[in-house]
Image: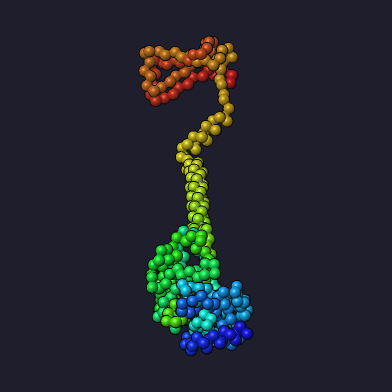
C-alpha cells in the first residue's frame, strides 16, 4: 500500500526527466538529487522491484533489503544517495525525490573496465611521501577527477584536478595514459584508511560521482629502504674490516717469509775463506799436541827469553832450550850475534830430549 502511494505521488509531482548515471562493477556511486527538501520524507526507489529506501527510516520502514549498500543523507538541503559495491544486476531505473513534492528519474548503467577491478592496497611510511596512481575509463578523459577519503559513513573530498596542490596533497592528470597520480607528503598515522578515486559529473538536477577505484592506504613506521640501507652499510663495514684484516695478515706473513729467506740465503752464500777458516779451526782442534822437554826441566807453562842486544835480528829467531834451566813463566831465546838471520827461522832442540 505504501509503495502504491509513493508512485501515486510520482504522478502528482508531475513528469520527471530521466538522467543517465554511470557506475562501475565493484565500485560505488554517489548521486545528488537537487531540489530543496521541504520537510517531507525523501526516498530512493528501484522501479523494477518497487523497493524503496527512505531518508527518515525511523518514521517509515524501508522496503528494500539492500544489505547496507544504500544510504540516504541530507546534503545541504538536497538528497544524496550513496550506492556501494555495485554489480551488473544493479543496473536499471531509479527514482529519487521527496514524497508528494518532487522526484527525478535516474537511469543507472553499470559497466566493467580493466581500470576498475576492485580494491588495491598501498603502503606508506611515516614522514615520507607516498604516491597513489589511479587509472580511469576513456570516457572520463576530460572530466574533473577527485580523490576522496572515507570518514565514517561519509565521503570527504581531499583534492581534485582543479587544484594541483592542497596542503600535503598534490594531484596530476596524465590524460594520454589516462591515470591520475596523488602524492601525500609527510605521511602521518591518521592518513591511513580507505580512499576512492572518482570523476565528478556535474548536472543541473542530478549530479553524480562514480568511485571507480578503492584504495586501502596502510601506514607503516619504518621504510624497507632504510632497513636495506642499514643492512648494506653493516655488510660493507664488515667486508672492509675483513679485507683490512686479511691484508694485514698477508703483509705480516710476507715479512716473516722474507726474513727466513734472507737467513737461508746468508748461510748459503757465506764466503769461502770463512768456511775454510772454520774447517781449519776444526782440524787444528783435532790435532794432537806434542811437547819436547828435558826430564830435568821444570816447564810449568813457562818460557824463558834471553835477548842479546848486539845481534842483528832481521826477521829471524833462534831458540835454545837448556836442560837445566828453570823456565818458570818465561821465554828463553838465544840469538847468535854473528849469525845472519835474514827471513829465516832456526829452532834448536836438545837431541837428548825424550819426547
How many marks the image carries: the answer is: 0
Is 204 drawn above or below residue 287 in the view shown?
A: below
The image quarter containing residue 335 is top left
Residue 23 visible in the snapshot: no
Q: Position of residue 80 (x, y in %)?
A: 50, 76
Quarter holding residue 337? top left
Q: Nearer the viewer, residue 13 or 86?
A: 13
Point 39% across, 23% down: residue: 315
Q: Which picture quadrant has residue 60?
A: bottom right
Q: Which residue shows up at 56% across the image and 87% down it? A: 8
Residue occupying the point 56% across, 29% down: 285
Q: Please indicate whether residue 219 sits to the left or right of residue 200 in the image.
A: right
Coordinates of residue 271 in the picture (x, y in percent): 46, 40
The correct choice, above or below, for 112 with respect to 285 in the image is: below
Instruction: Return the residue nearer the eye: 143 or 107.
Output: 107
Q: Is residue 135 above or below residue 304?
A: below
Amino acid at each position: 500500500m505504501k509503495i502504491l502511494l509513493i508512485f501515486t505521488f510520482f504522478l502528482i509531482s508531475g513528469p520527471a526527466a530521466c538522467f543517465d548515471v554511470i557506475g562501475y562493477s565493484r565500485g560505488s556511486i554517489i548521486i545528488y538529487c537537487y531540489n530543496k527538501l521541504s520537510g517531507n520524507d525523501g526516498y530512493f526507489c528501484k522501479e523494477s522491484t518497487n523497493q524503496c529506501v527512505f531518508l527518515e527510516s525511523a518514521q517509515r520502514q524501508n522496503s528494500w533489503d539492500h544489505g547496507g549498500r544504500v544510504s540516504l543523507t541530507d546534503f545541504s538541503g538536497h538528497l544524496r544517495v550513496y550506492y556501494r559495491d555495485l554489480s551488473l544486476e544493479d543496473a536499471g531505473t531509479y527514482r529519487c525525490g521527496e514524497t508528494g513534492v518532487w522526484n527525478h528519474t535516474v537511469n543507472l548503467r553499470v559497466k566493467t573496465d580493466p581500470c576498475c577491478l576492485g580494491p588495491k592496497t598501498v603502503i606508506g611510511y611515516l614522514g615520507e611521501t607516498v604516491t597513489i596512481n589511479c587509472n580511469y575509463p576513456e570516457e572520463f578523459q576530460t572530466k574533473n577527477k577527485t580523490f576522496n577519503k572515507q570518514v565514517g559513513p561519509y565521503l570527504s573530498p581531499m583534492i581534485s584536478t582543479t587544484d594541483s596542490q592542497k596542503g600535503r596533497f598534490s594531484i596530476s592528470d596524465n590524460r594520454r595514459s589516462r591515470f591520475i597520480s596523488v602524492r601525500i607528503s609527510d605521511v602521518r598515522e591518521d592518513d591511513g584508511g580507505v580512499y576512492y578515486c572518482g570523476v565528478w559529473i556535474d548536472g543541473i538536477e542530478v549530479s553524480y560521482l562514480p568511485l571507480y577505484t578503492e584504495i586501502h592506504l596502510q601506514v607503516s613506521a619504518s621504510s624497507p629502504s632504510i632497513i636495506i640501507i642499514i643492512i648494506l652499510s653493516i655488510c660493507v663495514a664488515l667486508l672492509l674490516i675483513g679485507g683490512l684484516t686479511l691484508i694485514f695478515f698477508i703483509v705480516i706473513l710476507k715479512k716473516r717469509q722474507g726474513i727466513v729467506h734472507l737467513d737461508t740465503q746468508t748461510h748459503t752464500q757465506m764466503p769461502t775463506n770463512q768456511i775454510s777458516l772454520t774447517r781449519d779451526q776444526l782440524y787444528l782442534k783435532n790435532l794432537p799436541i806434542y811437547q819436547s822437554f828435558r826430564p830435568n826441566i821444570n816447564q810449568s807453562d813457562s818460557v824463558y827469553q834471553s835477548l842479546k842486544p848486539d845481534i842483528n835480528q832481521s826477521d829471524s829467531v833462534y831458540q835454545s832450550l837448556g836442560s837445566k834451566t828453570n823456565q818458570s813463566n818465561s821465554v828463553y831465546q838465544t840469538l847468535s850475534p854473528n849469525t845472519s838471520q835474514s827471513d829465516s827461522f832456526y829452532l834448536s832442540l836438545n837431541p837428548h830430549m825424550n819426547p
